[in-house]
Amino acid sequence: MAQELRKLLIQKFRREKEVIFKRLPSFSLPLFLLFPAVAMILALYMFPFTSSVYKSFLTKEGAVTLTNYAKTIDLYLYDILFTIGVTVLSTIIATVLSIFLAVYLRLSTGWIAKSIRVLYRFPIFIPFVVVAQMMRTFLAPHGFFNLFLAKVGLLNIENPLQFFNWTGLTFGFVWKQAPFMILLISGGFQMIDDTYIEAARSVGAKLPQIITKVLIPMNRSTIAVAITLVFCSLAGCFSFPYMLIGGKEPATITIDIAHRVNYFGDYGVANALGVFSYFIVGFLAIYYVRNMVKKGIYE
């Protein structure tokens, strides 16, 4: 009797279990597996982001106002435009240089190409702090670059070139980030089969046509990824601009944020500057995410 009762209870439990699992949505398991990653993103990214945007509207007394944004535009509009200009210019130069070098590495097999493949990767592993110190020595008024120009008779060392400004920032940004772009773009070019290049050559296509009609269109998504990552990285870089130009004007947004917090304790204006930086990188990031989603859907 006890055994039969036990069997009946087990059967009832199994039936109830089956009913419960049938009622659960079919996507509950994927959601359960995604929950840790989503929770981490919400905790580490979305919460600081929303908190920063909310606090950018608050005064020190806790009142909601647009005063912080008015003060930001009044004091730092030129710095915001300076940040956009340097970031866009550096990204464009790095992209063009990276595409040309990646094409050369794709189509060449000599010892020069092999040497470049080994050497161009070194800047990728150098932190921006180290890059800043290197550039301060290399680009200083009496640094290596100006002394070299003076030695070859192209410059009077008493009137050296000044690089502790947008030109030095652009040079350092390109030197640091171009190798990273070459690594990504070159990897995409290597995945293009030789038959496409040979087919283009067989119909009379020259090198410019091969680059613009074959290599770049077939590697467009990788180039977009490289541009997005480099642009966002440069827009949010702090250590290199701070060490190279310091408190000079104009400065980048990241330097202004540090000054507002460290010297004035003005978190409202600092958060407002942060919101402007979100806008700078946001449009490109949204474009990139939308294209990646479309690519995933169609593939």
Image (cartoon, grey):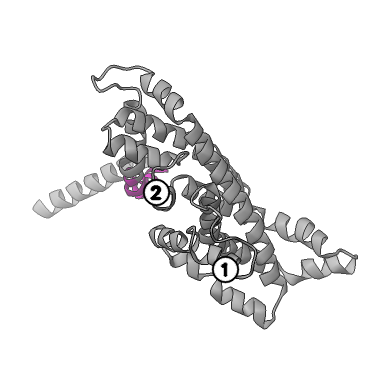
Check the image and name the residue furthest to the bottom: 111
Image coordinates of residue 55 in percent, x first then y, are 31, 27
Three-letter amino acid code of the residue under disc 1? Phe
| Horizontal and vertical percent position of residue 124 | 48, 65
Q: Which residue is mark 1?
A: 148
Residue neighbourhood size for the residue with mark 1, other residues' Cα within 10 Å, grouped as few (<14), some (14–19), many (≥20):
some
Q: Which residues are magenta?
A: 25-40
Q: Is residue 60 left or right of residue 25?
A: left
Q: Please name the residue shown 55% across and 70% down the image.
A: 120
**In the image, residue 168 above or below residue 196:** above
Give the SS element for disc 1: helix
- Left or right of 132: which side holds 153? right
Residue 19 x, y percent position in the rendering: 32, 41
Amino acid type, mark 2: Tyr
Q: CA distance from mark 1 to mark 2?
A: 26 Å
Disc sitting over residue 86 in the figure: none
Viewer-side residue, 104 vs 5:
104
Disc 2 marks which residue? 242
**Is residue 208 located in the magenta-colored stretch of the structure?**
no
- From the viewer's perspective, is residue 171 above or below residue 283? below
In percent of width and height, residue 160 lies at: 55, 57
Q: In the orientation shown, which residue stands out farthest toward the right?
A: 204
Above or below 66: residue 116: below
Residue at horizontal 26%, vertical 48%?
14
